[in-house]
Image (cartoon, rainbow, N blue to C red):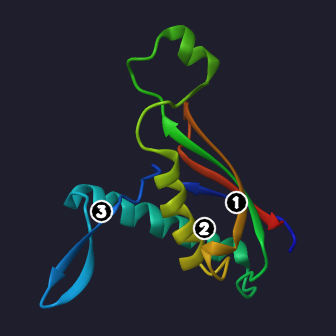
Amino acid sequence: MTPISFYVLGVPAPQGSKTAVVRGGKAILLDGATASARSKHAQWRQAVAAAAHEAAASSPPCALPIAATIVFRFPMPASRTKRDRALGWLWKHSAPDLDKLLRSTFDGLTDGGLIADDRLIVSVVATKIEVEGWTGASIEVRGA
């Protein structure tokens, strides 16, 4: 697979945990998040899917082992000092959890047709940062 790099604009949103409940004798999984969180997650996943679809350029979904590099870019809070802002970026060591961001992003890559199934991702380098400037993610996928 030729490496594919692209950007996703927006604010990265996590995919939360599911809650199992039994209704009518059947076990179903419900999203445990609030309506607002579900909406943000859906918007992020759709943004990733759209960018992945465009990046795939009509190629069939990759069905080989994949390595991914993702940098999640969050807005820098107004509370940051002038010195911190001058740096242009800082590590984001607060919510959301990196693993939940990866979950929603991988599902978006699958929805967009770039990869056949997110189980094919065998290697990941992922980073969360706060930035001055555009927010979203830079994503690169390549054969592992």
Q: Which residue is mark 3?
A: 39
How far is disc 1 from disc 2 in space, using C-alphas? 7 Å
Mark-to-mark CA distance, 3 and 1: 23 Å
Cα distance between the residues tagged 2 and 3: 18 Å
**Residue 60: percent from the left, percent from the top?**
73, 88
Q: Where, by quadrant of the figure, is residue 20 drawn?
A: bottom left
Upstream in the sequence, badge 2 or badge 3? 3
Q: Which mark is residue 51?
A: 2
The residue beneath circle 1 is 6
The residue shown at (45%, 17%) is: 80
Q: On screen, 122 above or below 11?
A: below
Q: Is residue 98 shown left or right of residue 95? A: right
Q: Residue furthest right?
A: 2
Crowdedness near tag 3: few (<14), some (14–19) or many (≥20) residues, C-alpha within 10 Å: few
Label 2 environment density (alpha carbons within 10 Å; few <14, some 14–19, many ≥20): some
| Count of numbered circles in the view | 3
Q: Which mark is residue 70?
A: none
Residue at 61% x, 73% y is: 118
- Residue 141 place in picture, x, y as percent: 75, 63
Residue 11, position as x, y percentages in the image: 45, 49
Counting from the top left corner in percent of width and height, residue 56 is at 71, 77
Instruction: Locate residue 16 relative to residue 75 in the image: left or right.
Output: left
Precedes in sequence: disc 3 or disc 1: 1
In front: 67, or 56?
67
- The kind of residue tagged 2 is Ala
Label 2: which secondary element: helix
SS of the residue under disc 1: strand
User: Between residues 11 and 22, which one lies in front from this camera angle?
Assistant: 22
